[in-house]
Amino acid sequence: MTVMSYLGAIGAAQKEAMLADERVVIIGEDVEANVYGTTGGSGKSRASEGDFLQQFGRNRIRNTPISEEVIVGAAIGAAMTGLRPIVDLSYSSFLYMAMDQFVNQAAKNRYMFGGQASVPVVFRSAMFYGLNTGAHHSDRPYPMFMNVPGLKIVTPAYPSDAKGLLRTAVDSDDPVLIFEACVLWGSKEEVDENEYRIPFGVGRTLRTGTDATIVAVSGAVPEAVAAADALAEEGISVEVFDPRTLVPLDVEGILNAAAKTGRVVVADPAHRTCGAAAEISALVSEHVFDALKAPVRRVTTPDIQIPFSPALEKQLYPNRKSIADAVRASVGARPAGGNGSVSTPGADAEALSTGAAR
Amino acid sequence: MLRIRRFDERASKMVKRGAIPGTVHTSIGQEAQVVGACMALGDSDYMTGNHRSHGHPIGKGAPLGPLMAELVGKSDGVCKGKGGSLHLADFAVGSLGESGIVGGSIPIAVGAGLSSKVLDNGRVALAFFGDGAANQGNLYEGMNMSGVWKLPVIFLCENNQYALSTPAHTVTSGVIADRGAGFGMPGVRVENGQDVLAVYEAVAEAVRRARAGEGPSLVEIVTYRFNEHSEGLRLGVDYRNQDEKAEWVSKDPIVLFREELIRRGVATAEEMDALEADVLREVDEAVAFTDASPFPDPSVAFDDLYTDSKFAVHTYHSSSFGTLENVR
Ligand SMILES: Cc1ncc(C[n+]2csc(CCOP(=O)(O)OP(=O)(O)O)c2C)c(N)n1
C-alpha cells in the first residue's frame, strides 16, 4: 500500500494500463506537458523514468488540437478499429462541444450496427466546481449522460476507487465516461500499488448506521461521511452509501441501504432537476416504499448557473451541514443549533423552508 | 455500379409500396463516384458513409441479401434489424457505418485512420460525405487533426449539388476542394464525377499518398442524384431545373461506362446484357433472402446495447419488466 492522491491514483492507473496493453493510447489537450496532472508519473517515478511522453512516445501520447468534437469522434473511430483510447477532456463543461459524438456515435454505434461495433474508449473529465471558475468551467454534467443508453458513467470519490475503476473502464468494451470532482483531488488514501480492478455496479458502504441512510455521489461523498460523523455525536446513527458508478447503478445496494433505516437522504452535487439524486430517489420510492418512515430527501445543487463570486458560489453545493440538516429533518430532529433530537411534526416543513433539505 | 443501381431501384419500389419501413435515400445517378472511390480502396481499408450510403458497402463488396434484409428490418439484416437504411454497416468489408446525422461519421473515419497509424497496419480510411455535410465544423476539425498527424484519411465529398432542396452554391462559400489547401493537403475536384475511371484515378492518388505516409487528401466529386432526396418524398417546389436534370440524366454513369467498355473492346454488348441479367438475379435473390428472414423477436430489443449482456440498465424498470426481484 502507498498513500496516493486522487490525481496520483488516476495517473498510476493510466500508467498501468499503458504498460499492460499497447493498444491503450492517451488523447487530449496538453497531455504531453502533463498540464492536468495525470500523465506525468508521480514524484520520484517522474524523476527516474521521465513523464508519459518519454516513456510511451508521441505515437501513444497524442497531444491534440482544441477540437473536442473530433477528439471524441476520432477516439470512437479508433476504438472501433482496434485501439483502446483514454481521452482526457480536461473540464467536463467541454463535453458539450462533442455532444453529437457522445450521443449519436459513442452510445449508439454498437446498438444500431447490431453488435458489429464495440467502442472500448474511456473519456475522463474533471468537474471544477467550487473553485470560482464561473459558469463555463463549473459543470457537473453526469446526469445528462445517464440519460443516454449505451454509455457507462463512473464517479469515483476516493483515490482507491479512482484507480480501480479506471482500470475496469479501460477493460470495458463499452464507452465509459469518468467524472472526477476536483474537490476530491486533494484527498489521500492508502492505495494498493499493484494492479487491481473495482467492478462497475458495486457501491461502497462508508459508514454503517441504523437511523438514516445517505446515498451520496461524487464530491458529496466525503461531505456525507463528515455529516454522518457529526450526527453520530448527536446520537443519530447514519449509513453512508456511495454507488461509485451511476451506470450501471448498484440498485440492490441502494435499496438495501435505504430499506435498512427507512430514512433516506440523497446527496448529489449535480443540478436538482432530473439529476442522479432524482433517479435514486425515484428508485427508492418505487421499490422500497413500504420500508420508508419519512419522505426521501434530496440535497443537490439548485437549478442555477454557477456564479463567479465566492460569496455566491459557496452556498450552492451539498455540504456536511446541508446534508446533516436533511438527515435531522428526516429523523425528526431539529436542525443543528436547535434543542437536540426532539421530534416535532413541523420539522420537515421547517427544513424545507430553510433550504436545509435542498 | 449496376449492383448499386438495381439494388436502389428495387429499394425505391419497395419503399413506395410499404415493403420497407421508414425512408430510403438512393445513390441513383451517383454510382460512378461511389464505385470509383471504393475500387481505389483495398479489402481491409475502412470507409464511413452518410444517410445516402447503401451503395457504399456494395462498392466495397458486401453481399446484397443482408443489406436488403436490413432495409426491411429483418433479423438477418446486416445490423440485425437495429440500424435500417440510415445506419447500414458491414464491418466484414470495412464499412464502419453510415450516419443519419449529416457529417456525423467524419470523425469516425479520422479515428480509423488514427488506429491504422498507431497500429501501423497500412489501412486507409475514407469518409464519404455530401456537399451539405461539407459545411459541418467537424469536417474541419477532422482535416486539421488528420493533417497534423499525417493520418491515412481521405475526405471524399460527394457533391451532388443539392443538400435536400438547397443548391450547394447558395450555402457554400468558395470551392469545397479548395478548402484542402487551408489544411495543407491536396484538394482535388473531379468535374466529371459520372466517369468512374476519373473518380478512380483521383482517389487512387489519394490512397497512394495515404499509404506512403504523406497524410490526408480532400477529393470533391461533382455528380448528380437522379431521384428525389428521399424516396417517397414529394416536395411541392421544383427546386431543380428540369433541363439541368435532363442533362445530367443523359450522362448516366452506367450507360457511359457500358459504352466505354464496348468501345474499348473489353466486353461485347451481349456480355454486358448477360452481366445485367446476373445482377438482376442477384437482387431477386436478395429480396428472396429478405422474405425468408423472420422479423427479430421482440426480446432481442435490448441486446447489443452493451457488450456485457447481463449489464442491462432496463433491469430495474419495473413498469415494463416486473419487479426488481424477478428480473434479476
Ligand atoms: C445534423 C443534421 N442536420 C440536418 C439533417 C437533415 N438532413 C438529412 S439529409 C440532408 C441533406 C444533406 O445534404 P448532403 O450532405 O449534400 O447529402 P446528399 O443528401 O446530397 O447526399 C439534411 C439537411 C440531418 N440528418 N442531420
Image (cartoon, rainbow, N blue to C red):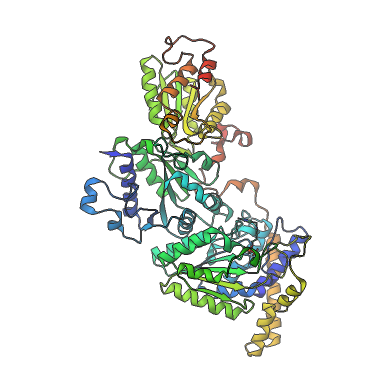
User: In the figure, is residue A207 to the left or right of B189?
Assistant: left
**Quadrant of the snapshot with the N terminus of chain B:** bottom right
B118 vs A138: above or below:
below
Q: Nearer the viewer, residue A89 or B7?
A: A89
x%, y% of residue B91? 53, 62
Quadrant of the rendered image containing residue B38: bottom right
A170 vs B94: above or below:
above
Q: Nearer the viewer, residue A257 or A190?
A: A190
x%, y% of residue A213? 45, 23
A81 vs A246: above or below:
below
Quadrant of the rendered image containing residue B240: bottom right
User: In the figure, is residue A11 to the left or right of A128?
Assistant: left
Q: What residue is at 59 percent from the left and 81 percent from the top?
A: B197
Residue B76 at least partly seen: no
Q: How many marks?
A: 0
Q: Nearer the viewer, residue B119 or B221?
A: B221
Q: Nearer the viewer, residue A216 or A65?
A: A65
Residue B314 at least partly seen: yes
x%, y% of residue A95? 48, 47
Query: Where does ligand 1 appear, by image quarter?
Result: bottom right
B321 vs B53: above or below:
above
x%, y% of residue B304? 55, 50
